[in-house]
Amino acid sequence: MAIRTLAARTLAAVLAFLNAAPALAGKAEDTLVYASDTEPENVSPYHNSAREGVILARNVWDTLIYRDPATGQYRPMLATAWTWVDDTTLDLTIREGVTFHNGDALTPNDVAFTFNYVLTPEARTVTKQNVAWMKATEVVDARTVRIHLKAPFPAAFEYLSGPMPIFPAAYFSKVGLDGFARAPVGTGPYRITAVQTGRGVKMERFANYWPGSPLGTPKIGRLEFRVIPDGDSRMAELLTGGVDWIWRVPSDQADQLRTAPNVEVLNSETMRVGFLQFDTLGRAMANSPLKDARVRQAISHAIDRTAMVDNLVRGGARVMNAACFIEQFGCTDAGVTRYSYDPAKARALLKEAGYPDGFEIDLGAYREREYAEAVIGYLRAVGIRVRLNYLRYAALRDLIRSGKVSIAFQTWGSFSVNDVSAFDGVYFKGGEEDLTRDPETIALLQAGDGSTDPALRKAKYAEALARIAGQAYALPMFSYSTNYAFTDALAFTAQPDEVPRFYAAQWK
């Protein structure tokens, strides 16, 4: 198995440069520069599903409800109170005294506009699962909105506290989505001052951020997000003071960075799960072998997920057997089929399915290329010859939705929503990214999503997860353990939900 390793001479050269470099600029200029490899396709939170977009959203936009990451409790944010009128009607009181970054005052009309807009086809909301549980939102009076649900949805607060920020109605209506993407406006602790396509986003502390926010007052004056696709370049920028914070650092590089001066390395398991998604409908190629469950099961037995965790992912990562993050509500691996590493069984299943000599197939991936290459190596060992199609996330997602990818190496962080609906609702409930469209699985997930009985929800989800695993509709691989590396002048704490809270960071 090939494991990506940075050449020792490269690190030595960077360290030599560092010894002659000036002091880190971030603290001196009160600007935290953070870098990642991916640029969101659109800065608008409802119009991208990249983790980098989620990070921007949490620092620039507020939501109606706040979920405390330490306790899991829901607390007031833009809504000061809420009441269930009945199982499908939710009233929320909207906070007074909140100002958008452009000076507009927050009103219930902004809330109703946002939620009604993202439900429309013309909105082109990227992850419809996040909002599809709503039917409509109306203004009740000067301080109250009423959300009408399509059916009971106990996970509503998880979504209202996560991927559902509020837009300024008048401004958005004036500039449209394209204008909003170029000059976004929110109510959050930071305001965006520049969107630079291909380069990143600049932000500054919002001077009129509302007092009493559970996020507190940001300690750092400016944030700058930089897009640096190459991992070695990101590391070099960190070591030479060009950036203050990077993440998704490969384990071998993280080990080397721990020996570097002025750098701290932090490892943390996240809610993100890597998984192989199979085109069980056979849309991507004629006479697709993946239509046969035995082939999908063979692939699942061919991959040594434990070795990948131990040698590639490392840190706090764990093998996942159910198609969800194990600590999400409703996620369980009890009763699911477990695919041990067994190449002999894989070859036997392929022979039984009529492929004794294997076959050729494509695999799409968009991050951690070394993980995809390891999977390809395992499959080659049992006779499956794989062509890697390595793309940017948005491009791969579009190919998956159009049925042009046979096997996709996917990762999903559930928008940090701590409910199994945020994972399986996206990939197995009949939506654009469901490559199976299995009526039985869809019905089980719908029953789990719509019940107000927690025990019944768990039971239905358990049935769905067991079916997904038994039919090998997808192969859960492992949770992601992320290595963060940052200047030792920065006080930063990681959270399992994979949301770097820069508004809570500060200089030492």
Image: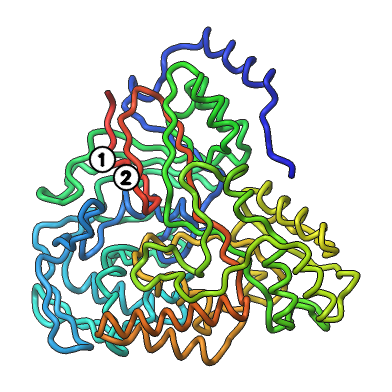
What quarter of the picture does the N terminus occupy? top right
In this rendering, is residue 288 above or below 252? below
* Numbered disc 1: secondary structure: helix
> Would residue 97 appear left or right of 10 to someone viewing this image?
left
Which residue is pictured at 51% across the width and 22% down the height? 239
Image x and y of residue 13, in percent = 64, 15
* Numbered disc 2: secondary structure: loop
> Would residue 72 appear left or right of 92 to someone viewing this image?
right
The amino acid type of the residue labelled 2 equals Arg
Instruction: Find disc 2 in the rendering and name its residue.
Output: 501
Instruction: Find disc 1 in the rendering and name its residue.
Output: 504
> Would residue 505 appear left or right of 415 to someone viewing this image?
left
* Other-residue count near label 2 (Cα within 10 Å), few / some / many at <14 / 14–19 / ≥20: some
The amino acid type of the residue labelled 1 equals Ala
* Other-residue count near label 1 (Cα within 10 Å), few / some / many at <14 / 14–19 / ≥20: some
Image x and y of residue 103, in percent = 20, 54
What quarter of the picture does the C terminus occupy? top left
Which residue is pictured at 56% across the width and 33% down the height? 234
Which residue is pictured at 69% across the width and 39% down the height? 3
Which residue is pictured at 18% across the width and 47% down the height? 209
Where residue 138 sits, quadrant-wise, is bottom left
Circles 2 and 1: CB distance less than 8 Å? yes
Where residue 219 sits, quadrant-wise, is top left
Q: Nearer the viewer, residue 8 or 220?
A: 8
In this rendering, is residue 53 above or below 358? above
Q: Kindly identify which numbered label has been placed on residue 10.
A: none
What is the spatial separation of the Cα atoms under label 2 and label 1, in whole angstroms? 6 Å
Q: Which residue is situated farthest in the top direction here?
A: 20
Image x and y of residue 149, in percent = 28, 86
